[in-house]
Amino acid sequence: MPLGRFFAEEIAEPLGLEAWIGLPETFEPRVGKIELGSDMLPFEVGFSPEQRSDPVFISVWGNPPLFPTELPWNTRAYHAAEIGGAGGIATARAMARYYGCMAMGGTVDGVEVLKRETVAIGRAEQSRFMDPYIAEAMAFGVGWALQTPQGRFGPAPDAFGHSGAGGSIHAGWPTEGVGFSYIMNQMRADPEDLRSRHLLKRLYEIVH
């Protein structure tokens, strides 16, 4: 079964999510266009010669080179491709509902898409380290990224989810039974990007 169809039948359709891995062409006019902030520089400009001579660094940031002038992520071909690790397209509301479901153990509004014990396995920590290529603390479970001292997923210490290049953040807070999604069009390289941090701080205050 193709990945996009599996995702649709097992996750998106049962939860009523506007989310796809392989976007149907009929929805193409609704897709927002991504743009680069002034600090999101092309590979050959944004990094030093020493960095660009490091084989591991090249494999991370230059294979293919990130952030070209013409972004492939804005093309119909990319939207249509079923790329599991980087090709999902969804509304913020859909991502928030998905993570709300995961935060509540895999069931929301009477619809179970994962068993509670499966979600627990997905959150079980497997690694925690400082990524030397983006200078950021990382932690991962079997299925999702986990909270770190940097607090990328907001104030909740048990948060889990994933972040996207340029500033998008999507996660669940199990203690609060909350899922959220912050999606933007302009990508920024600022590790302390405050656009989502202020919103998540306020959301945490509200649910408490």
Image: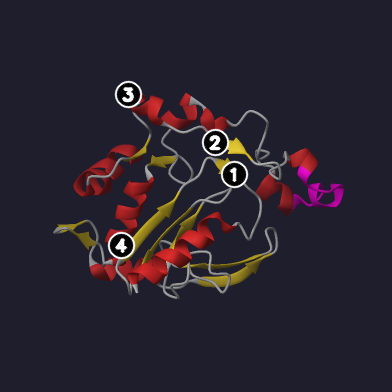
Sequence-earlier tag: 3 or 1: 3
Residue occupying image coordinates x 63% and y 28%: 70
Instruction: Give coordinates of residue 180: x percent, y percent.
Output: 38, 57
Say left or right for 173 vs 83: left
Sequence-earlier tag: 2 or 1: 2
The stretch of residues the image draws in magenta is: 46-55
Q: Amino acid at mark 4?
A: Met
Q: Which residue is mark 2?
A: 34
Q: Marks 3 and 2, Cα distance to the nearest angstrom? A: 19 Å
Q: Amino acid at mark 2?
A: Ile
> What is the crowding at mark 4: few (fewer than 14 residues within 10 Å), some, or many (at least 20)?
many
Dividing the picture into quadrants, the one containing residue 34 is: top right
Q: Which residue is mark 3?
A: 26
Residues tagged 2 and 1 counted as in contact (Cβ below 8 A) = yes
Looking at the rendered structure, the secondary structure element under dot 4 is: helix
Answer above or below: position of 165 versus 156: above
Residues tagged 3 and 2 counted as in contact (Cβ below 8 A) = no
Taking depth in this image into account, of 175 and 125 the one nearest to the observer is: 175
Taking depth in this image into account, of 153 and 116 the one nearest to the observer is: 153
Instruction: Give coordinates of residue 41: x percent, y percent.
Output: 72, 41
Can residue 3 be seen here? The reply is yes
Q: Nearer the viewer, mark 2 or mark 4?
A: 2
